[in-house]
Amino acid sequence: MALWLYATLDGVGSARQLAKLCEDHIAYRWICGGVSVNYHTLSDFRTAHLHWLDTLLTQSVATLMHEGLVTLHRVAQDGMRVRANAGASSFRRRPTLEECQSEACQQVESLRQELGKDPGACSRRQQAARQRAARERSERIAKALGELPEIESKKKAEDKEKARASTTDPEARVMKMGDGGFRPAHNVQFATDTASQVITGVEVVNTGSDQGQMTPMVEQHQDRYEKAPDEMLGDGGFAKKEDIEHLASPEVGTTVYTPVPKPKRQDRDPHQPLPDDSAVIAEWRQRMGTSQAKEIYKERASTAECVNAISRNRGLRQFLVRGLEKVRAVVLWFALAHNLMRAVALRAQAALATVGD
């Protein structure tokens, strides 16, 4: 765990690179006591303990809350599209996927027959590797076919035949990236306590839009800490009326600060309620027009976007693993490493304040 935390802070995301550092770099050699570590063991450990990593995030933030360093009074959420470990050419339509699946099944069967006819045709290890590769490819193609109905459901009726899924990472989706281009990616969601810049919530989804992601994040906070944030900050992509109304309910009690969409008519004040607005939506429109709300909203960029930038600088630019489960495990490592550094700084600040008093 110490190796991966240090590697994450150092911008190292490859298990092979980390294994090499354990031989060549004095800091990594010291952490593992001068004993070499197999890259496969490092790779498996990084993604094999998703539930434990998730629990550790909850426990570490809860400890900071107990110390009074995190309050969850104001939380900022932001999405970040991160390149998936899949090429654009790996996305195929249904007929091609079905053809690929048939070929993959034939390959698996031919390898079985080859081994049965002549067990000495190649070494046992080589044969096992070939069979495993063929089996895994067949499983990925089957999973891609399983993802197609969901992809088709989000397209217009006339475009359903154009739906494509990746044979490399079936759970990846083509998304519009920050530079305006379209590439296979995953949407990483971070929630950050604005007062401490501690990451309090993590999610990974395979939809390119942030709309509808605020309610699940608040519910995640309720599950983790038995407390919903008092206020949630998000950019215009999170502005969804159903979320705002649900979060304002007495059961949740969270005030949402997201920009009001620009009206189609330029002469209309966007902060004036519309005739069909509910009381909650009307209050949201009016609230976002106040100077106080504008000052509060400024904290979003200095926290959520700052945390995203720090993660980018530490190497969160492209995933080297495939599948939402493994991707989420990698994102949790980034959150834990970030919070470790923030905890050190926050406790140092608290100690100085105590000495000053």
Image: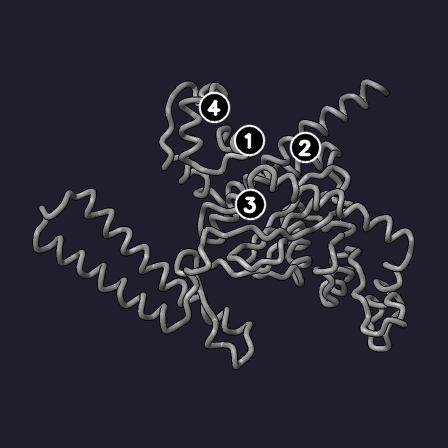
What element does badge 2 sit on?
A: helix
Q: Which mark is residue 28?
A: 4
Location of mark 3 (residue): 317
- Hey, what amino acid is under mark 3? Arg
What element does badge 1 sit on?
A: loop
User: Tag 2 or tag 4, which sits nearer the N-term?
Assistant: 4
Q: Residue at x 90, y 72 (%)?
A: 267
Query: Taking 57 as reference, is 274 left or right?
Result: right
Q: Residues within 10 Å of mark 1 (few under 14, many from 20)?
A: few
Location of mark 1 (residue): 10
What element does badge 4 sit on?
A: helix
Question: Compared with residue 86, is residue 8 higher up or lower down, i.e. above or below?
Answer: above
Query: Taking 312 as reference, is 356 left or right?
Result: right
What element does badge 3 sit on?
A: loop
- Hey, what amino acid is under mark 2? Arg
Q: Disc 3 versus disc 4: distance between alpha carbons?
A: 23 Å
Across and down, in percent, residue 86 comes to 45, 54
